[in-house]
Amino acid sequence: MARPGSSKREAIVAAAKTLLWERGYEATSPRDVMALSGAGQGSLYHHFPGKREVAATALAEMAAEEIGVIDALFTPGTPPLDRVRAYLTRERQALRGCRLARLANEAAMEEPALREPVAAYLGHIETSLRASLAEAREAGQLAPGLAPAALAAALLAIVEGGYVLARVHWDEAAMRAAIDGGVQLLAAAMRPQA
Amino acid sequence: MARPGSSKREAIVAAAKTLLWERGYEATSPRDVMALSGAGQGSLYHHFPGKREVAATALAEMAAEEIGVIDALFTPGTPPLDRVRAYLTRERQALRGCRLARLANEAAMEEPALREPVAAYLGHIETSLRASLAEAREAGQLAPGLAPAALAAALLAIVEGGYVLARVHWDEAAMRAAIDGGVQLLAAAMRPQA
DNA sequence: GTCTATAGTCGGATAGAC
DNA sequence: GTCTATCCGACTATAGAC
């Protein structure tokens, strides 16, 4: 399995990554993956035991890619508050939903192999936010009474909730409003110094 | 249609409400609805043209019910900040997901008949929050630079995002952390007076 | 209004040739 | 490794009896 020279395997995983983002897990059939990748049924079931493992592989790759993007936003050296703001205000395709967390409400999340990459991605963001907020706190930039861990969770929830609002209203502006509110709240949380 | 004495119709809608919350739209089949309601296929297709209309009816009822719950939380007379906090900290079954917004990432949200009840529900919450925050602002309780509309969107996103975090981590505590952060941020946003 | 029987399609997966 | 042929069950819906 996972041999580097295996061309159809890569095509299958690439197709699965596209379709999982576009349609989610339940709505993506092995047939869809085969059609988009150009692979036959034999290839798919040669390389993977079944649909779940294809999705697990695709999700793991997606999580690794997105974690790389996050790490680029949280460059050490940048002032901690700027890192947090950079995460909040980065460009997003709100109507497409979060590439990983869009699966949150699918029954498939009860399968550890599918939940874990998504949880790792969100966990990584939360950890990065918490570290930045803790750094700001030590520099005396955080108002007292504000816990970095709780703030990190709230800011991440604003982003993930922003995707939900945008999808439901079918309007990117709903995401922008939530992010705006987050940025304003963050500013208020630091007012003493900043 | 919708005749009051029609007993199977009510059972069908009640079953659909249960299953839509539990499994979502795509994962709920007419057969599931029939099995849970005790109705036969003839009844279902006598009262409704198909699955979509069953779901649209169920979602409309769910939205009306939940809007009633929201209105009870935003009782006029209570201090505005208390209303906002009451909404944030109300009890929730985080792992079950938001009864309406759990459908946000389904393809069915492209159908207006299904999206509209969900959008109306979230819109109603956002309006209630905004009105309370505007009231607090006029009473001089909001720090300058904070826009009620953006704050309302952010607080709603914290709740909806909290559901996402709880589902992905399969841990109610993830929702509690996000809400805690929201409450702390709200307090910071008012610090001048409160 | 409600039921059972039936239909046609797609779901996920296996068998076995090349 | 890759392909085509095939299987069985579930999905949404229609037909028509009661």
Image (cartoon, coloured by chain):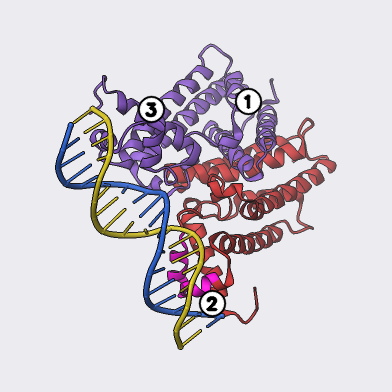
Chain colours: A red, B purple, C yellow, D blue
Query: Which residue, as the protein is rendered here, is positioned at the far right?
Result: A138
Give residue B61's mark: 3
Residue type for callout 3:
Glu
SS type, badge 3: helix
CA separation in Å, label 1 and label 3? 24 Å
Residue type for callout 2:
Lys
Vertical side of B156 occupied by B67: above or below: above
Q: Which residues are magenta?
A: A29-45
Give residue B89's mark: 1
Circle 2 residue:
A8
Vertical side of C15 occupied by A126: above or below: above
Label 2 marks a residue whose chain is A
**The one of B65 and B38 positioned closer to us in this rendering:** B38
Task: Say which of marks 1 and 3 sits in front.
Answer: 3
Residue A117 drawn in magenta: no
Residue type for callout 1:
Thr
Q: Earlier in the sequence, mark 1 or mark 3?
A: 3
